[in-house]
Each structure stands twice: as C-alpha cells, then as structure tokens.
Image (tube, rainbow, N blue to C red):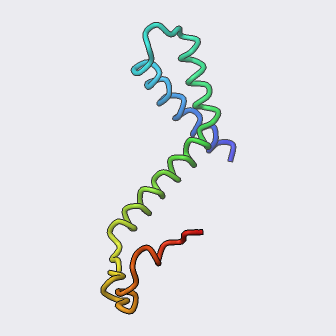
C-alpha cells in the first residue's frame, strides 16, 4: 500500500511540477512552485477521489439527459381541467 501511495505521489508531483512551471505567474518565486508540487504529492489521493467523483457526476448527468422521460400531460389527463394556480402550494 505504501508503494502505491509513493508511486502516486511521485506521478502527481511530476505532473504538478509541469503545471507549476507552465501555468504559474512569472512573478511568483520558486518557493511557491515547490509548495504546489509538495502539496500535490501529499494530497494526491484526495485529488484522485475528487476526479472520480467529477467523472461520476458527468456520467450521471449524461445518463439523466439521455434517459427517456414520460410526458406527464399526455399520461395523466384527469388533472387537465385543474388550473395551475390550484396545483401550486400557496402555504
């Protein structure tokens, strides 16, 4: 388990180093870039879980968008004569 964590930390640190060099503001010093790399290496499991959650949400949203929906007005004609104001809760 430790080997998996260390390999993930190394891969994330290398990716973070590339991102820190490429996308950082030139006015920031190397200490800031090193801090980003170290934090990415330490907290990579949290980032991986967040990425998996984001992918899961994207897949769920795509499934919900493409799922067939029933037309309520066409399937329940008994409420067709009820005005909209009576259907709303006016608590």
Which residue is nearer to you in this view: 89 or 17? 89
The residue located at (44%, 14%) in the rendering is: 25
Q: Residue at x 54, y 71 (%)?
A: 89
Compared across the picture, whether 86 is left or right of 75 comes to: right
Q: Residue drawn 45% across and 54% down? A: 55
Residue 26 image position (x, y, % from top left): 43, 9
Q: Is residue 84 left or right of residue 42?
A: left
Quadrant containing the C terminus is bottom right
Looking at the rendering, which quadrant does residue 81 occupy?
bottom left
Residue at left offset 61%, top offset 43%: 46
Q: How many marks?
A: 0
Q: Which residue is most to the bottom?
A: 78
Horizontally, residue 8 falls left or right of residue 1, namely: left
The image position of residue 24, as x and y in percent, is 44, 18
Residue 48 drawn above or below residue 90: above
Residue 16 percent location from the top left of the image: 50, 28
Q: Is residue 32 left or right of residue 19?
A: right
Nearest the camera: 10 or 83? Answer: 83
């Amino acid at each position: 388990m430790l080997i998996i964590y260390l390999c993930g930390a190394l891969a994330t640190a290398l990716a973070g180093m590339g991102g820190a060099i490429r996308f950082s503001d030139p006015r920031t010093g190397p200490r800031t870039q090193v801090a980003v790399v170290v934090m990415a290496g330490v907290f990579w499991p949290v980032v991986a879980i967040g990425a998996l959650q984001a992918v899961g949400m994207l897949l769920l949203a795509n499934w919900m968008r493409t799922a067939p929906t029933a037309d309520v007005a066409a399937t329940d004609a008994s409420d067709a004569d009820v005005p909209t104001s009576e259907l709303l809760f006016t608590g």
